[in-house]
Every structure is written in C-alpha cells, then in structure tokens.
Image: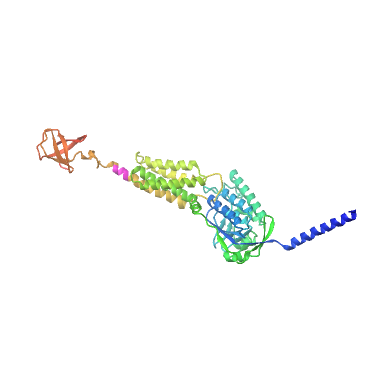
Amino acid sequence: MTLRGWVLTGLLLFGALGVAAETETEAGPTERSGHVAIARIQGSINPASSDYLQKAIAQAEAEAAAVLVLELDTPGGLVASTKDIIQAMLASRVPIVVFVSPQGAWAGSAGTFITLAAHVAAMTPGSSIGAAHPVGIGGGGGGAQDEEGKTTDPSAEKAENLLAAFIESIAAERDRNVEWAEKAVRESVAVTADEALELDVIDLVAKDRADLLAQLDGRELVLNGEPVKLALAGAAQREIEMSALTRFLNVLVDPNVAVILLMAGALGLYIEFNQPGTLIPGITGAVCLLLALIAMQILPFSWLGLLLIGLGLALFMAELFVTSYGLLFAGGVACFLLGGSMLFDMPEVSDLNVSFWSVLVPATIGLAMFAAIVVVAVGRSLGRPQAAGVGEMLGMVGRATTDLDPTGTVFVRGEFWRVRAEEPVSAESSVEVVGVEGLELVVRPSRNSR
C-alpha cells in the first residue's frame, strides 16, 4: 500500500473512533432499574449496626438492586464503626441513598459522615444534621479549650484534625459543601433539612419514602466513575431486616444498658452471697453479668472502671462484718459512681457514653438501697439470740418424764430427750436445759419458766 493509502486509512480509523465516541456520549448515562432495597438504622452507630449495613450493601449488590435506601436516625456512635461503614459505602457497586427520616430524626455526629458519603443525601422536613465534633466515650467534651474555643488537649486536637480531614475528603468525593463539613467537626455546627439543602450539604428534601422515590426517578448520578440514571418508576421495595442476633447486640452494646446489666449482676450476686440458697438472685445476677461481659467484648472498656465497680461491691460486703458507721458503705457508693463513669472511657472518640445523671446515678442509688436493706437485715439477725439448732435450747424449760438420778428422759420443745441431771430430779418436775452434749441434754431443776 502506498503512503497515500496508509494516510487515508488512518484518517478513516480516527474518524470512526470519533463517531463512536460521539455516539457513546450522545447515548447518555446507563439506565439503572430494578427493585429498591431498604435498610434502616435507628439508634447508635456501633459494631452491630455497622455489620448490618455492610451486609445490606452486599445483599443489594448481589440482588442487583437499582438503589439502596438507608433510612437513618442516629445521635452518633463509634468512630471505628463509622469508618467501616464509610469504606463500604464508597466502594459500593450499588447507588446508596441516605434518607434522614422520619420527621424529627437526627443525623448527628457519625450520622453526618454517613449522610455525606451517600451518592444521594436526602432529609425529611424537621430533621437535622451536624454536630460532628469528637466526644470521649466517657462523656468528655473533647478536651480543654482556650479563650478562642480551640482545643488545647493534644490527643483531642489530634482526633479533631483527623476527623476534620476525614469528613472533608468525604464531602469532596461526593461534591458537597467541604467548608460546612469541616465546621460540623471543628465547631459542632448543625442545620435543619432546608438549611442543609440551601448549603449544598444534601441533595433533596422529601416528606416521606414515596416522595423520595418519586424525586429519585430519572435522577442522574456517578457510580464508581460512571454516569448512571435511576429508573425507579413502579419499582418494587424490599426491606433488608436485621437478624434477631444483630438486633439483640444492637441493644446490648449501648453503654447505658451494659452498665445497668453490670450493676444488676453485682446486686444479684451480693444478695446470693449474703443469703445462700435463694438461687433466683444468684442466677439472675450471673445472667446479667454474662450479658454485660458480652457487651464489653464489643465495646472497648476500661479495666480501671471495672476494678472500681468490683471494689465497690467488696466494700458493701465488708460493711456487714466491720463496724465502720457507714464509711465503707459510702466508699462503695463512690466506687460505683466513679467506676461506672470510667467503665467505657477510652482513647477512641465516640458519641456513645454512659449518662451520669439519668442512668448511672439512679442505678447506683437503687443498688445502694438494696445493699443497705441487706446490711440492716443481716445486722439485726446477728444481734438476735440464736433461734435454730440445738444451741437455741439453752434455757428452755421442760418436764421430766422419769426420775433423773442422774439420767433419764425429759419432754422439751415438743420432743423427748435423753438427759443427764446435775442433781436428782423427780418425775413430772420442771427442769431447765443448761447444756448440750452431743445428743444428750444437761438439765437442772427449773428456777424460772420460759
């Protein structure tokens, strides 16, 4: 082929490629149809809810769902669990729509990260989003601050900077308001649904799920770098339910629930130790402690807090045997309060915390009241004369059924006993028990009645 022929062939090939590219461009985004998968998170972001959402994404991908709608209402949660959810969302092969609902719902703290990471972010009127500043799990406020409101605690500042960079990268990836996202972490700003839409934090406001799906139909978005168009008209809806075990763990990993279970377990064992054989308090306490230990296998906890709670229980028990005029008991209450507030205090930042006034204080007061009742009851019983066993027969008066010279039998406490008399006693005379030697009583003529 001549040079001219090669040139003409090359021009034809380039022209064909250009026409193909133009045709592909004109074809527009790929249409995505199918059913709508529905997932729901109501409550804290924790390992259980994180596992549920990751499985929901995997299931939606496996079933070729057109879109996964996550209905979200959360005050926040663990950073580690939030990070796992975000990674799964960014790598998802199915479009994810986060819908903050129902009305009055929150996308607080960790929920802000999850909402911003969605392909489409939506909220109901009356819902709110923001306040993503890191908080210590023990209820701390993220460290000390100077006069300008800046964090001065190095560890808290490190966490704040890390989360600020994290949320900025998420907002930039989804083409949302990066500046506002940073303020949500550093300044704890929060906005309503309408304000979030105006600030380009979310994509739309919908009054309910039906309204949301109607607005999503025909919407174009980018999925893993490729443009797609949602075709949801008449699409079936399939809810992805939490398994029974996941629902149970989702409740169990609430630090408030874990602390209550721990104290209930301590109370049950305390009653069982002081009243052996009652069984029900002991069994109930053991079950509560087992559930609390399961929660602490999921939620990182502080050994110091756990040891303080154990010390508080030991001080309660010591009050039974040591006359401290209530000092040991007061020390036990203080240990329970301090240990409970420190139980889930850890380096990782989180919005999960033990509510001091609404949970910890009432639980400690209830435990202290039961323990005080036991202390008073046991103290009174120790002060009373023995009322069971052969020892309680000392001083009892009976009737000699035979002559006692020095041995014979007497009738006392509704029973016939073999006795030995200190001095001769005639039959039918009253005698008083003065000693017990094995199965034989020692008696003397009665000087008073009982």
Q: Is residue 207 something that shows in the picture? A: no
* Number of marks in picture: 0
Q: How is the image coloured?
A: rainbow
Q: Is residue 358 something that shows in the picture? A: yes
Spot occupied by residue 58 in the image (x, y as percentages of width and height)? 59, 53
The C terminus, quarter of image? top left
Nearer to the camera, 360 or 405? 405
Q: Is residue 380 magenta?
A: yes
**In the picture provided, is 181 more to the left or to the right than 255?**
right
Spot occupied by residue 129 in the image (x, y as percentages of width and height)? 58, 58
Nearer to the camera, 330 or 289? 289
**In the picture provided, is 356 more to the left or to the right than 12?**
left
Residue sitting at the far front:
1
Residues rendered magenta in the picture:
377-381
Nearer to the camera, 162 or 31? 31
Q: Is residue 169 above or below residue 425?
A: below
Spot occupied by residue 22 in the image (x, y as percentages of width and height)? 77, 61
Q: Residue at x 80, y 59 (%)?
A: 16
Q: Main secondary structure of the magenta part?
A: helix
Q: Residue at x 38, y 44 (%)?
A: 270
Q: Residue at x 44, y 43 (%)?
A: 309
